[in-house]
Amino acid sequence: MNETRQDAWTEDEDKILADTVLRFIREGQTQLEAFKEVASTLSRTSAACGFRWNATIRKQYHHAIQNAKEQRKNGFKKQTIFATTSPADFSQSHTIDTAIKILERMRTEYPQEKQQEQANQLEKVLKENDRLQKQLIKYDEAWAEMNSIWLNVKS
């Protein structure tokens, strides 16, 4: 029984977490701020991101962390991020990766069965609405007839 947890971290999510934390270290920002940014990107809590970083990812990036700290000390400039890639390519790639993650999460959170169930419920509600509208028309007709009878009796 080795089922993967629905909230399990993927390699891509780990990469986004690591890249973001390393960037924040280079830029002299706190890891807590990095966790908040990653949390909003991946639809997770900042606590979950912090836990994942400290429990798992940090160990794999020991040298990269040291390099990021050195770059910060040596006056790291944001432009060095794009040394091999143009800024447009970098941001577009990150945006596409983020969009893919969001869509994958939506697919798992709103599977086809739920969509079908919602469609069935909508159909039932529309039928009930139609039935009630027809019933209302009958009541209006009955009321009009009662009003007509009342006017005849009154005269």
Image (cartoon, rainbow, N blue to C red):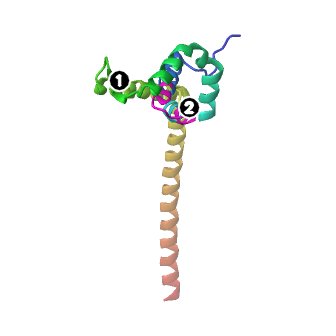
Specify the principal SS of the magenta part.
helix
Q: Earlier in the sequence, mark 2 or mark 1?
A: 2
From this viewpoint, which residue is outermost toward the front? 74
Mark in front: 2 vs 1: 1
Give the CA separation, mark 2 to mark 1. 20 Å
- Foreground residue, 91 or 124? 91
Q: Residue at x 28, y 23 (%)?
A: 86
- Foreground residue, 94 or 18? 18
Q: Residue at x 48, y 30 (%)?
A: 24
- Foreground residue, 138 or 64? 64
Q: Amino acid at mark 2?
A: Gln
User: Can I make out residue 7 in this image?
Assistant: no
Q: Residue at x 49, y 56 (%)?
A: 133
Q: Residue at x 64, y 20 (%)?
A: 5
Q: Quadrant of residue 45?
A: top right
User: Can I make out residue 142 in this image?
Assistant: yes
Magenta residues (range): 22-36
Residue position marked by numbered label 1 in the rendering: 80
SS class, disc 2: helix
Examine the structure image and report whether residue 34 is included in the region drawn in magenta: yes
Image x and y of residue 80, in percent: 35, 23
In the rendered image, the vertical position of residue 87 relative to residue 32, given as above or below: above
From this viewpoint, which residue is outermost toward the top? 1
Residue position marked by numbered label 2 in the rendering: 31
